[in-house]
Every structure is written in structure tokens, then in C-alpha cells.
Amino acid sequence: MPDTVMRSVAVPSRTEAVLDAVKHAILTGNLMPGQSLIETELAAQLGVSKTPVREALKTLAGAGLVTMSPYKGASVRMVDDALAHSVYDIRVLLEPEAVRRSVARAANGAGHWERAEAALDAADRATDRADRQQANREFHRALYTGCGNDLMLDILDGLRDQTALVSTAVWARNATWEQEAAEHRAILEGIRAGRADLAATLLEEHIRSFLERNFNQV
């Protein structure tokens, strides 16, 4: 494992710091899909004991970024067509409807649209895939967070890490974020115009087109 993957971390929360460092390494591609995550090596790189590393890997496994095997140990989750379709199928079912509802409740949404705009600007300034991913996550969440359904929010939030894993793998071989940024701005324009159905349709097309461009049908 390269020495440049991550920098040393310190208290107050070693587990949280390890979690952030390993997640950042995965979402920048420094830790590649399928790569083994050896606790002793990570602990040495990060200047911590194996315990916070072990706890961080368990958390990342729960978020869908890491796989755990009793025989092979931990590794970065592989991104394949089945994973991409599983994640994006749920998104296309729920996210456009969540955005439609957010726009319908626009009296409570002005602040969300400002956050979405700020996320687009942050994505334009991003210097690595992890920063761009974070901005992308913030943009999408700002669009649907005003939907008024906490369970819908929880489901969509639970997909954010796996969505980031999929798009990071795609961007490593095909830098499509400029096209996606243009689609994002068109969606936001529809929202600002109060056109809930248009915004939902554009978002559905955005999600589907990413999947169709980059993954085979399953």
C-alpha cells in the first residue's frame, strides 16, 4: 500500500479520523476497488493502533464502501454493473419524487436552493475527486432534503456513499463531471422556476443517463 495514501491522524477521535482518511482515500481512487485493507498497514500509516482501524472498517462496510470476509479480510468494494444498477434503480424511484415534493413545498426550500447553488460552485472549484464527490453529494441532498418525508430522506442518505463509490470508479476512467455539472444546473434552473415536474423529469434523466453511459444492462 503506497505511503502517500493518507496522512497521520490524531485525537480527539481516532476512529473518526481513520474513517475520514480511509473514506477520502477510497473516493480519490488512492485505494482502488478490490484493494486489500490490511489493518496493520493502515494503522502504521495513520499512526494509530489497530483498534480504531478495525472500527472504521466496520463502519465503512456498513456504508457499503468496504467488504469484509472471514478468510480474506477487508477490501475496498468492487464496483460492477449489479452494484451500480442496484443503487441507481432505487435513486431513480425515490429521488425525483423527493425533489418534486421539495419544490412543491418551496416556501420552506429557499435555503436549500442556495445550498445547492453553493455546492455547484464548490464542484467547479474542486481539485480532486473526493472534493468533487462531496460537492455532488451536497447538491443532490439540498434538492431533496425539503421533501417532508423523513423515511425517504433516510433511504436516500443511506445511498450517498455507494453512489459516490460508483461515480468515483466511473470518473477514474471517464471524466464525465462536466456533462453532469451542466445537467445539475438545468435541474436547479427548473427548481428555481418552480417547475416541479420539469425538475423531477430532468433529474430522472440525469440519473438514468449516467447509468446507461457507463454500465451494461443487468
Image (cartoon, rainbow, N blue to C red):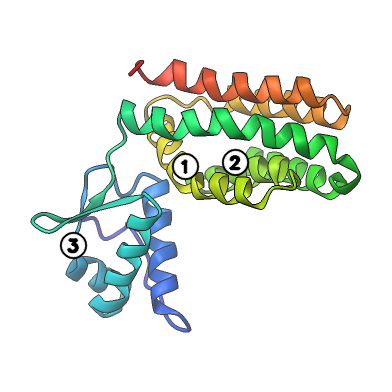
Dot 1 falls on a residue whose secondary structure is: helix
Label 3 and label 1: CA atoms lie apart by: 23 Å
Q: Earlier in the sequence, mark 2 or mark 1?
A: 2
> Which mark, by number, is residue 136?
2
Residue at far right of view: 107
Label 2 and label 3: CA atoms lie apart by: 30 Å
Relative horizontal placement of residue 199, taking residue 57 as reference (left or right): right
> Which mark, by number, is residue 38?
3
Would residue 109 be seen by someone viewing this image from the given angle?
yes
Q: Earlier in the sequence, mark 3 or mark 1?
A: 3
Classify the position of the C terminus by image quarter.
Answer: top left
**Label 1 sits on what residue type?**
Ala
- Judge the density around disc 2: few (<14), some (14-19), many (≥20) Cα neighbours within 10 Å: many
Dot 2 falls on a residue whose secondary structure is: helix
Residue 121, image quadrant: top right
Dot 3 falls on a residue whose secondary structure is: loop
Q: Which residue is mark 1?
A: 164
User: In the rendered view, would you say 22 is above or below 169?
Assistant: below
Closer to us: 199 or 149: 149
